[in-house]
Every structure is written in C-alpha cells, then in structure tokens.
Amino acid sequence: AWTKHQVGGFKDKDGFESEVVRHVETTLARSLYNCDEAAAYSATALAFRDRLILEWNRTQQRQTFSDSKRVYYLSLEFLMGRALDNAMLNVGQKDLAKDGLSDLGFRIEDVIQQEHDAALGNGGLGRLAACFLDSLASLNYPAWGYGLRYRYGIFKQEIIDGYQVEVPDYWLDFNPWEFPRHDVTVDIQFYGKVSRETNEKGKAISQWEGGETVKAVAYDVPIPGYATPTTNNLRLWSSKAASGEFDFQKFNSGDYESSVADQQRAETISAVLYPNDNLDRGKELRLKQQYFWVAASLYDIVRRFKKTRRAWKEFPDQVAIQLNDTHPTLAIVELQRILIDLEGLEWDEAWNIVVNTFGYTNHTVLPEALEKWSVPLIENLLPRHLQIIYDINLYFLQTVERQFPGDSDLLRDVSIVEESEPKMIRMAYLAIVGSHKVNGVAELHSELIRTTIFKDFVRIFGPDKFTNVTNGITPRRWLHQANPRLSELIASKTGGHGFLKDLTDLNKLELYVDDKEFRKEWAEIKYANKVRLAKHIKATTGVTVNPAALFDVQVKRIHEYKRQQMNIFGAIHRYLELKAMSPEQRQKQMRRVSIFGGKAAPGYWMAKQIIHLINSVGAVVNNDTDIGDLLKVVFLEDYNVSKAEMIIPASDISEHISTAGTEASGTSNMKFVLNGGLIIGTCDGANIEITREVSQDNIFLFGHLSEQVDDLRYAHQSGEHVVDPKLVRVFEEIEKGTFGNPKDFSDLIAAVRDHGDYYLVSDDFSSYVDSHTAVDEAYRDQEGWITKCITSVSRMGFFSSDRCINEYAEGIWNVEPLNTTQDK
Ligand code: 26M
C-alpha cells in the first residue's frame, strides 16, 4: 500500500519548515525577516519540487526497466493552472504544509494565490489535456505529454470601459516546476529542397537538404499522480538558434545584428500561443510551431524506442501516440519519413507501423475550425513532407477506387488534397487515414462525426475505426482542490477519500439525501463558496451581490455558437419584466446574479461586442434603484483555471446553451454539477449524457434538437425569418439606447434579425426564457433544490477523466498501468 513516506514526502512538519527556510536563505538568498508571501510561495514550491523529483526519477527508471508500452499525448495546449496546491494534495501533505507555513507566519491560501497560472492553452481542449495528465499519473500509466514551452501563454484579459484589452502573459519569470534539459536537444530543419538518388541496390532514396535549422531544447515538468508514487513527465520544447559555424563567423566578423536577428527568428517559434479557439487561420508561423514540436517529439520517442534494440515492426507494441485534434497531424508524415528515408523501410511496412501507432481525437465539427494548409505553404516549408502526403493520398485513393470503382465524386470528396486554388491539405482527413482509431468526445459528437463530416470514411474504413470516448474531468483538482469543504463532507459519508480514485463511489451519497445534518452542512458549504465569490466580485468589479441570490454562471470562451449573446438578451428580458412590475409584484421575484466570464479571441469582433454588451447592461442594471438586488449582471475579468476553481463551487445554476450539435462535449458542465450546481442547457455535447446520469428531473433542458438545426437554418434563408416577440422587445430596448450607443451592438442584433440567425438564438429564445422561469420556481423550493443537487452529485461518477483514460487505454492504446509496489 502507498504511504506518505513512500512518495518521498516530508517526514514531518519540522522537516518541511527547515526545507522552506533553507530555500529562503540559500536558493532565494533572502533572510527570513524580509520573506514576503511571494518568497514564501517560491520556497514552498521549491521544497515540494525537491520531493517530487525523487519520485519522478524513480518512475522514469521503473518505466524504462519494465519495458512496457508507453502513451505519448501530443497536444499544442496544456492548460495546467497552478501546480503547488495540486502537488501538496497529490502527495497528501497539504495539512502539514498548512501548519508549517502557519508557524512561519503565513496563511497557506495566500501563499497558494501567489502562483502564476501556467496557461498554455485556450479552453476546453487544453484543459482536457491537463486533466488527462493527472489521470494518467494517478492510474499509473506510463505516459508522457509533449507540448510547446510558449514564452507567452494565453493573454491576460483586462476590461477597460467595458471592452476587452489583451495584455501579454509573461509567465516564466519564476517557474520552479520546470527543468531545462540543455543536454536534450534536437535540430529541426525547415525549407530546403529534396534530391533523389539511387542507392547500390537500385532503390530510389529521397534526401531533404539545405534550408535552415532551429534547435529544440527540452523542458521537463513533473506530473504527480494522486496517492501514488507515479510521477510522469510533461516535456515542453523551446526553440533556440542552432549555433552553427555560420553564426559564429557572422558574430565574429562583427555582423552582430544579423546574428542576433537569426537568434530572434528562431526563438519566435515557441514565443506565443495562438489565442484562437475553434478557428483556423492558416498562418505560416503556426505551421512552423506544429512541425517544430512534432519533429522534436518524434525524434525523442524514436530515440527512446531505439534503445530497446527491438525490430521496427514492434514499434506499435511499445509506442501509442494520441493526437489531440489535428494540430499534431504532421507527426504521421514525419514518422513515415523517418522510417522510409532515414531507416530504409519499405513504404508498406512503414505505413503499417504508422497507422498502428496513431490515434486521432476530433474536438469540433465547426467548419471554420477544421485545419487546412495550403499546398504552396507546405511545399516551401516542408518539401519532403508534401511529397509524402501526396504519396499517402495516392495509395489511399487507389484503395478507395478498388473498393468503389468509378465513384469519382467519392474520390474528390475524400481526397486529402482539396482541388481548390490554391490546393489545400485537409488535415483531418490525413489524420483519419494515418490513424487506427478516430474518436469524438461525447456520444452525440461521435455520432455526428460518423454521420456528417466523416461519413465517407466510415464507408471506406468500416464503423469500427470510429469510436466515442466521452470526456471527463479530474476530481482531484475539480472537487478536492477547488472545493475542499465539500470534499471533506463527502469523505465523511462515503468512508474516506476513496471516491477521488473511484468516482463512482459518490453513489453512496444518495443514502444521505434526506439526512438533515448532512443537508444543512451541504447548504452551508455552498453558501460559504458564494460568499467568497461575492467578495471577489466586490473587490474586482465594485458590484455588491447578495450571496442569498441565485448565482447564474456562464464562464467559457466567448463564441457565437456558445451563445453568451442569448444569455445577455435573456438578462435584458428579465430586467424589462422587473421594470414593468409594481413594487409589490417585484418583491415576490427571485433574486439573481448573472455572472459571465471568458476571453474573446483578439480578432473576433462579434465576441468582443458580446463582452461589451454584457458590461453595458451591467452598468445600467446594477445601478437601477428600482431593481436593487433582484438582478445584478457582472463580467469577471480574465477567466482562467485558478478563477474557475473559485467560481465553479459558487454556482447554483450554470449555462451550457450552445446551439444543438455545435459543442463537441463541454467539460465545465461536468465540473459545475460535481460541485453541487445544476445546469441549464441544450441537448448538446455531454449535457445529454449528464442528463442520462442525473435524470431529466435534475437538469433544465430547453431548445431545439440537433436534428432540427438544418431545417431551421434552411427556413431562415428561404422564407421570412420571424424574430421571437420577446427578443424583438429586447432589441428595441437596446436600439433605444438604454445600454449606451446602439451602434456598438448593431452587429449582434443584425446577426439574429437580418443575417439568418445561424446559431438559432431567436428559435430557442422563448424556451430559454421559460426554462429560466422553471429555475426560479425550483430555487424557491430550497429543500427540493438541495435534493436535486445532492442526487446529481451522487450520480456524477461516470465523468471522471479516470474512466475516460481507462477507455482510451483499453480501446485505443492497448496499454496497461504499471505496478508501483515492486520497487523498494
Ligand atoms: C486552430 C488553428 C489555429 C489556432 C488555434 C486553433 C485551435 C485551438 C484550439 C482550434 C481549436 C481549439 O480548441 C478547440 C476546443 O477547445 N474544442 C473543445 O474541446 C473540448 C475538449 O474535448 C470540448 O469539451 C469542447 O466542446 C470543444 O469545443
């Protein structure tokens, strides 16, 4: 069995304190007298880091000696958030650290707050990767994450005069969680040209020559599992100028400037995370990032495989590579290139290895997010890869032609090369052809990819290649860490913290749903979480909110398909209804706080208008003395992982209201319910499976179904589009200037009224409003509400990312956990 001592934790509180003091005095070169909270954080982080390293090294040794198959999770995004709290909880020593820090004169909460989020991601896709790393380590899978070490993560959002302003996120000033591996580097080639030679055996050999070289340097981040010694590795690549003779001469001959310019150009590759979410812009630097990261990672993986001295055909028995969306699809081409050009394998043998190695996860059906790269761009940057892509396509289309003779429409439709001007490479198609499994991230989404965007590939490859793995979340961060009091309460009823390792244990709670004392504590915890959020709202926006009001939360990236515009139109509608009431009538209404948060991609005009409208409505409503605390509207600045940890446990109801068929899964929906909040949502993504688990009675569903969406859109385009009368009233009020200059919001209104209402805001508006009325009525019955919340939490076991990772391991990777009890 695992004990604290085994994971190399501190022997006792004194042991911890003396390590903190040592780091303050030596590593940080400060005296205890001028040790502020920032220094206390640094020293605590360094002390825990030292502990993690020992287990990390042991884990790597164990995995190497056991010779077992490893999983490599390739993701351009890892939205990790803070590491210290997580590390303390995972090694089971947060209480000890709390006492130790208190002896030194610090409150642990304040120390934790000093840490800068590691925000190397945009939203759901990046956070999913982070939850997966936690589960992989907690379940003892031999697994590595591979990503890019961006110098700037997702921008910080400031709200100035109601508008979003982007501020660069320079997060690397002090990062105790990474270890530079200056000895682990890979030279990455770009541009150049391909020459063909014939070798002694008369075989044609392609060689990629010339061009420029950039150096990839590895930075390793330890990933501790919960209550296990397993500490896996996240390897992030940083770009650097390759110091060749050429640069040296330049520098020596006094050509400093161009030498420095070369250096800067190289470093630009890993400089910044692209801030788009669900949008592809086809920029050359993005393609460079992708190849740089993929090539470095594959070189590393191949190098590790070669040390085993196995035959190449055993590669897929040792290596599983998962592609987090199409962003790493070039890995398929790169591995084929390594095998045929560098290792001398025959095409078919190599291709077999490639296909058996890769799995591809699709995260979106939105057409604007499906990656395509122009042929001239690839040809220039990666000339040999383009040739290989053409060959992959040729062989693929030949098999299609044999299977469906004469179906030239099909050939055109499934071709990896789109015959446009310029020609484009369809990355999703390349990923499908080069993988043995393709999965969607929730049942509806997986069904949609099988029947719409990838339907032709189901005909060609058969249905078994396409599968579903419904997303999940780590209960360690999203319950134990974010909501410690609720975690303790649950532990007290379910027989300890076992539910954090097997979340289906939550079902034991259903026995206590009528337990008075338990219900009271439950309600107190929710209230305390709301008080904490109310303080944050006051401190950051100046708005006073009543913690007894219903907290209605929508926090996620701002996107038209997620329909924050519908939410704010709904809030305006509520405001108008309240205004129209007599004071006596008003007194009977439920109090609401409408809470928004989320970043808009910097170039996304409509999303920025939505933010501005929310803030403009807040400015009016929050200062209307007729309304008081019956309605408040707030926009929380700079939504990120650590803010989510505070906001989610404080919600009564959260909004997951995407147009049916557009949100692949959603994962915050799971986090909210796990923390004792209810959901208002559409029949979309994982909402559907949440409903299956918690039952229809415990969720507020509304709106049209995904099957109806095409017909509705078609009707909008052909006939006159009639806007819902309540929405018309909302538009009138905006256009009257009630919320400031109506011109600022005219595009938001026009999208619904004049441009076909692509996201069906009007079609769903009345059922949305009705659903909110149902929420009010349900909340009026506080006892009934608490019953719904407890029942829902008890049924959330399915949504652990542990379940999800086990499904990948069994159905896609064919890997098993590694026993950790053997070693001394
Ligand atoms: C693409 C090209 C250039 C720059 C950026 C991108 C890009 C970045 C992120 C495209 C898509 C990105 O993320 C998509 C995403 O986050 N999808 C979400 O994935 C979650 C995890 O599976 C799901 O829960 C969400 O429903 C889905 O929207």
Image: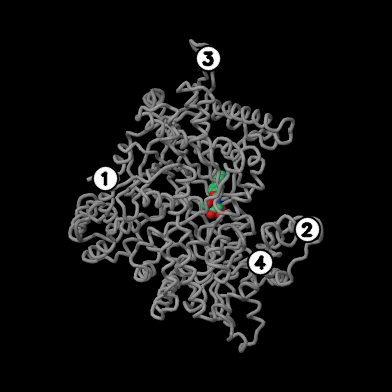
Tell which of 538 and 586 is nearer to you: 586
**In the image, which disc is placed on residue 737?**
none
Which of label 4 and label 3 is nearer to you?
A: 3
Q: Position of residue 354 (x, y in %)?
A: 50, 32
Query: What residue type is disc 1 on?
Result: Gln
Which of label 4 and label 1 is nearer to you?
A: 1
**In the image, which disc is placed on residue 822?**
1
Marks 4 and 3, how far apart at CA: 71 Å
Of the numbered discs 2 and 3, the one sitting upstream in the chain is 3
Query: What residue type is disc 2 on?
Result: Ala
Which of label 1 and label 2 is nearer to you?
A: 1
Residue behind mark 3: 203
Of the numbered discs 2 and 4, the one sitting upstream in the chain is 2
Residue behind mark 4: 741
Tell which of 5 and 591 is nearer to you: 5
**In the image, which disc is placed on residue 715?**
2
State yes or no: discs 2 and 3 in contact (Cβ < 8 Å): no
State yes or no: discs 3 and 1 in contact (Cβ < 8 Å): no
Marks 3 and 1, how far apart at CA: 49 Å
